[in-house]
Amino acid sequence: MKNSLVIQTLKKISLSFLALSLTACNFLGDHSKAPEPMEETSKKQATQKEDAEAYVVQPNYDHPKFKELDAAFKKQKHRFEIDRCEFKYNDQSIFIGDSYDKIIEIFGKPDEKPVFTSDKISYSIEYSSIKLFIRFFSNTNKLKSFTLRLSDYEEPKNIPYEIIKFRKVPYKEDMTLNDFTELCDLNHNKTLGHDLNTFNIINEKVCESVIESIDTAIGSQPSYKTIGGGHMTLRGDFDPTSTGPIEYLSISIKKN
């Protein structure tokens, strides 16, 4: 009888120790990891917020001119598409960072031999027949920037295509920038910004597939109201009602 009582007492003590051990393990499991620094958490939250609020151009497919221009674009021999994350020539993809060899494979032999900058940091090639100017890093032979020159001052005009697609929106070379914004949701000073020489898209969403941040310059000369006259003429406020054509589009690695 005494032995049975002793055994039962020992079992109770063992179970008590086991329960205490499990409780201690759970406690340590919940609290042993150091909490994530508040600064890192704030950065993550800020990045997520910026990504959620980042802008993506939306085409106005219902505009009467959209389908007509889109159909004409598809019939062209030379088709350039300058989207946010991917650029295409006749359905062949081009990316910032592509190799010199890949570009030659797509476009063929350039007009002349590569032309180096004075500091030898980069070099350029040109395809004047399709108005394409491309620059590469000298040390890696990787694509640094490319420019479509949409305006030709020679007579007669010598551009072998009339329409390109910019952010999925067809742009015809005789359109003004404001004509183009009617075909999408770009809006001056809200989603379409400018400096003294070019326009740019404000807070455009970054491409996850591209390591470097990309800058797109829309080469249309901004207009400004004038103050005074003669020798006392001053530049006034930006005039969003008056825009010229897009003379070029330049895509490059963004300078920090």
Image (cartoon, grey):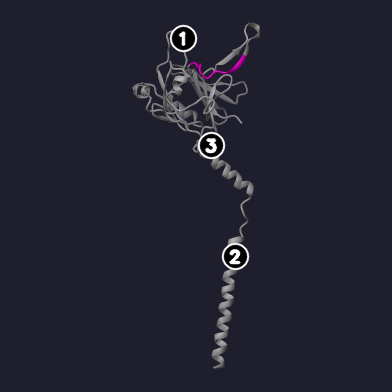
Task: Give the residue at x 57% y 27%.
Answer: 138
Main SS, magenta region, reads loop
Q: Position of residue 108 (x, y in %)?
A: 43, 23
Q: Which residue is mark 3?
A: 211
Pick the residue in front: 160 or 163: 163
Q: Give the numbered dot on residue 240.
A: none
Q: CA distance from mark 2 to mark 3?
A: 42 Å
Pick the residue in front: 216 or 192: 192
Quadrant hosting residue 256: top right
Q: Which residue is mark 1?
A: 154
Mark 2 vs 3, N-terminal side: 2
Classify residue 68 as left or right of residue 28: left
Q: How many labels, in total? A: 3
Pick the residue in front: 8 or 101: 8
Quadrant hosting residue 23: bottom right
Pick the residue in front: 107 or 1: 1
Q: Secondary structure at mark 1?
A: loop
Q: Secondary structure at mark 2?
A: helix
Residue 57 colored magenta?
no
Classify residue 92 as left or right of residue 3: left
Q: Give the numbered dot on residue 27.
A: 2
- Mark nearest the camera among 1 and 2 is 2
- Type of amino acid under label 3: Ile
Q: CA distance from mark 3 to mark 1?
A: 39 Å
Q: Residues within 10 Å of mark 2 (few under 14, many from 20)?
A: few
Most extreme residue toward the bottom, as rendered?
1
